[in-house]
Image: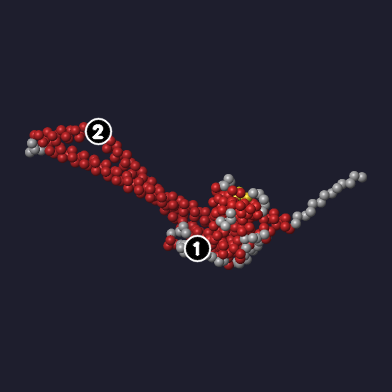
Amino acid sequence: LKLIKLTVSAPPTDHTVTMTEFNNLSKDLNYEAQAIWFANGFYSIVKDDLNKIYDWWKAFVELDKQGPTKKGADGNELDQFWSAKFLEDNVQALTALQRKEALKVIDVDNNGKMSMIEFLAWHYKQEPAMVARAPQGDNEAQIKRAQEQMAKVQKAMAEVINSLAFLKQQQEELAKLKAELEVAVAELHRQQEAFDSKLASLDAIANDESASTVKKSKASNEAAQMRAEDPLPLRKAKITQEAALRKVEKQQKQVDKAIADNEAKQVQLEKDMEMAKKELATAQASGGGGKGAIWWMQRQLFEADAYLPTKRQQYDHRKPFSFSP
């Protein structure tokens, strides 16, 4: 009989499972979701640093935009070059050699990249296994609804604000151009009026019976010379400038309408923002954790509020953002 050798694989250890879960956080979540996961799980540790973590998130996004994939907010990890750049800009106590050594420790999954959750785990000295199993709260469904509403409002508000900024810049440029054209048109009319006035004056002298023959002859000759001049350049310039002025005035009306439409959208989005605030308040009132996510959404509301007209703002933007769920 031929003996068959059986190979039995050892079951995965709990450590292996949690490390896989941690690596999946880096792989499956974008920078913002990674930051919120960490803030939820270690709120008591990071609560005083959340504004700094929020700024770090923005830095990850901006560096990702410059990296090879250019995913920006949809990215999940920076390559080695941009990881080193992040540490250089945000952990300035490290030397170049220390940054290189730190990246080896931070890069838990050894893929040559740094996710935000890897950085946070390293910075706050938390074991990846603890991060992977960090509690996220039992009000996740409510928080998710609030997050979706907030994201929708923020995206729409950003688009409206950008449109208004562009349109108001156009409005200013058109107003400046219109003023220049009005001056040009007025000058052309002044030249035409001066020409007509002088010609009429010469004709009057030439036909004045009381004037001397020499004076009348001189006036008649000068009037003839003026009539012999080509009137086309002045006439063409007037037509061209007046047409340009009408075109600018038409564009102004279009821009003014677009501004009014966007301002109306902004008013509606302010109402939508109030609904998002109520959804957030419901999630907060329910308890059950998720404090990092709640703080994050409040910070986003704070930033969205800054775009509103000053009289309608609900936060004091002269002070740093502060909130305690």
The residue singled out by tag 2 in the image is 230
26 with respect to 228 (left or right): right
Is residue 43 placed above or below 250 in the rendered structure? below
Dot 1 or dot 2: first in sequence order is 2
Identified at 50% across, 61% down, the residue is 302
The residue singled out by tag 1 in the image is 320
Return the x and y of residue 247 as percentages of the image width and height: 36, 43
158 with respect to 180 (left or right): right
Q: Residue furthest right?
A: 1
12 with respect to 109 (left or right): right
135 with respect to 67 (left or right): right
At label 1, the amino acid type is Pro
Question: Can residue 190 be seen in this snapshot?
Answer: yes
Query: Which dot marks residue 32?
Result: none
State the image quarter where residue 11 is shown: bottom right
- Separation of residues labelled 1 and 2 (CA atoms): 69 Å
Return the x and y of residue 210 as percentages of the image width and height: 7, 38
Question: Nearest the camera: 225 or 120?
Answer: 120
Which scheme is used to colour this image of the protein?
A: secondary structure
Identified at 52% across, 56% down, the residue is 153
Return the x and y of residue 133 as percentages of the image width and height: 67, 60
State the image quarter where residue 35 is shown: bottom right
Quarter of the image with the N terminus is top right
Identified at 64% across, 63% down, the residue is 138
- For disc 2, the neighbor class at 10 Å (few under 14, some 14 to 19, many from 20) is few
Quarter of the image with the C terminus is bottom right
Q: Secondary structure at mark 2?
A: loop
At label 2, the amino acid type is Asp
- For disc 1, the neighbor class at 10 Å (few under 14, some 14 to 19, many from 20) is few
Question: Nearest the camera: 155 or 279?
Answer: 155
Q: Residues at badges 1 and 2 in contact (C-beta under 8 Å)?
A: no
Return the x and y of residue 320 as percentages of the image width and height: 50, 63
